[in-house]
């Protein structure tokens, strides 16, 4: 398609939206300001660099053996650069503690900001923000499935120290990059089978978190988040950090509550929770993911729930206070493509939500005119938002439609398939 055709189509689509009072140019300006935190761990199947010999644990699992996984920080950064070059906008990278880039033999209770200096330098050069996560899994001290809520005080202490240090690293990122870092605590702790005592581990988790968060950090540099889960592989019967647990903890202690789209009952959605949570917190962290049966981490597709999440954020003006992170890992397809698909979908869903005639729909709803509400909602589903999306990609200097795939295929030939 020529530039003229692209612009011509855009002008036509724009006029259709204008009839409903939607200023598309303004929408695109707003969209360009939204940052997505892309997770580093899709690039190497959540292995990291500190304990590469440890198997992935903690009730999460990556399946597939697609060639070309990143094995070094340089390879991972190269793959990330490729992915970011195919995604419109300036975003953030979400790191885990096991991605420390150092020749030293450091354990998780010894990590310091300097072990992540190369990431900071790279993020600065790339114009990216950074987010962070303590890694409370894939480690000998998490082998029996418990970390911050472990019954052994020495093991608990190890993980508390790890999380404390992780927050300081987050604050260092924020200070260095001039962009707030969100440090998200997720622990896998739970039982495979029905426990007798559901309370004691939760008491231990609560007091361990109090210790982790005791140090006051500059909120402009670091914001803390806590992530719940319903079940995982090996923690089918009971997860210590359940939704109720962290909803309570986050609200009481002024922490961001992290909602992972894959951490609830199969028909339970996080889109429905955002409005309630927004009334009781200063902000929310999202792990945009896609549940499928027992898995919570499939590549994000342009499905109803993704669009519903985007609509809630846009309709209720929550984009300023919501931190949008991605969380999926698939080793059965090209890993760079996985990032590009999931991230472009998330941005595309936000665009589509911004192109909704929300005021008219609200008025119809308030007036009890549910006929108009349904009719307009349905007709808008075939409005040409794809044309606007194409124009936006072009304007932002990234490939239009599936043209990005050729670039990923070329990168696969030239780089990924040559890896050992
Ligand atoms: C696991 C949680 C958690 C992890 C990452 C790697 O179920 O979703 O967010 O996926 O920390
Ligand atoms: Zn998650």
Image (tube, rainbow, N blue to C red):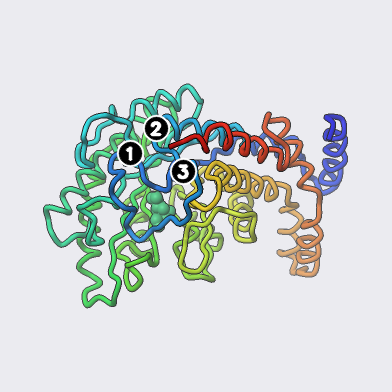
The image quadrant where one finds the C terminus is: top left
Mark 2 C-beta to ligand 1 under 8 Å: no
Closest to the observer, 167 or 220: 167
Q: Name the residue under label 1.
A: 49
Nearer to us of marks 3 and 1 is 1
Q: In which quarter of the image is residue 170?
A: top left
Could you say whether the residue bearing mark 1 is in a helix, strand or loop?
Answer: loop
Nearer to us of marks 2 and 3 is 2
Could you say whether the residue bearing mark 3 is in a helix, strand or loop?
Answer: strand
Q: Residues within 10 Å of mark 3 (few under 14, many from 20)?
A: many
Closest to the observer, 340 or 368: 340
Q: List x then y, in percent, for residue 199.
A: 23, 70
Label 3 and label 1: CA atoms lie apart by 15 Å
- Residue at screen point 50% across, 25% down: 126
Q: How crowded is mark 1: few (under 14 residues within 10 Å), some or many (20 or more)?
A: some
Q: Name the residue under label 2.
A: 73
- Residue at screen point 32% across, 56% down: 57
Mark 3 C-beta to ligand 1 under 8 Å: yes
Choose the circle earlier in sequence order: 3 or 1: 3
Q: List x then y, in percent, for residue 372.
A: 80, 65
Q: Mark 3 points at which residue?
A: 39
Label 2 and label 3: CA atoms lie apart by 14 Å
- Residue at screen point 81% across, 52% down: 383
Could you say whether the residue bearing mark 2 is in a helix, strand or loop?
Answer: helix
């Amino acid at each position: 398609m020529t530039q003229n055709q692209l612009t011509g189509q855009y002008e036509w689509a724009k006029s259709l939206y204008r009839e409903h009072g939607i200023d598309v140019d303004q929408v695109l300006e707003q969209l360009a300001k939204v940052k997505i935190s892309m997770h580093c761990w899709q690039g190497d199947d959540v292995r990291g660099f500190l304990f590469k010999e440890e198997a992935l644990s903690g009730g999460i699992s990556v399946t597939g053996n697609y060639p070309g996984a990143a094995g070094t920080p340089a390879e991972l950064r190269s793959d990330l650069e490729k992915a970011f070059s195919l995604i419109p906008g300036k975003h953030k990278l979400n790191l885990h503690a096991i991605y420390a880039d150092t020749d030293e033999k450091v354990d998780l209770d010894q990590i310091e900001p300097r072990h992540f200096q190369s990431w900071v330098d790279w993020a600065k050069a790339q114009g990216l923000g950074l987010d962070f996560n303590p890694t409370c899994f894939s480690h000998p001290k998490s082998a029996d499935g418990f970390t911050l809520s472990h019954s052994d005080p020495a093991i608990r202490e190890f993980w508390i120290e790890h999380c404390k240090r992780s927050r300081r690293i987050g604050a260092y990122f924020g200070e260095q990059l001039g962009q707030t870092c969100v440090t998200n605590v997720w622990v896998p702790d739970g039982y495979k089978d029905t426990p007798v005592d559901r309370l004691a581990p939760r008491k231990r988790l609560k007091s361990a978190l109090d210790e982790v968060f005791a140090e006051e950090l500059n909120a402009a540099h670091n914001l803390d988040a806590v992530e719940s889960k319903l079940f995982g592989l090996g923690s089918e019967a009971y997860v210590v950090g359940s939704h109720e647990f962290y909803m309570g903890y986050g609200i009481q202690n002024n922490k961001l509550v992290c909602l992972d789209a894959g951490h609830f009952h199969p028909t339970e959605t996080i889109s429905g929770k955002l409005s309630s949570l927004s009334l009781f917190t200063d902000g929310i962290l999202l792990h945009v993911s896609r549940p499928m049966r027992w898995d919570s981490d499939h590549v994000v597709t342009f499905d109803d729930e993704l669009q519903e999440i985007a609509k809630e954020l846009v309709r209720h003006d929550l984009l300023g206070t919501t931190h949008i992170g991605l969380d999926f890992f698939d080793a059965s397809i090209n890993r760079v493509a996985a990032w590009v698909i999931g991230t472009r979908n998330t941005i595309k869903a936000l665009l589509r939500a911004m192109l909704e005639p929300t005021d008219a729909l609200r008025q119809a709803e308030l007036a009890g005119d549910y006929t108009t509400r349904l009719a307009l909602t349905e007709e808008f589903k075939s409005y040409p938002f794809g044309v606007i999306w194409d124009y936006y990609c072009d304007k932002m200097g990234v490939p239009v439609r599936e043209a990005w795939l050729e670039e990923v295929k070329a990168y696969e030939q030239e780089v990924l398939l040559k890896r050992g």
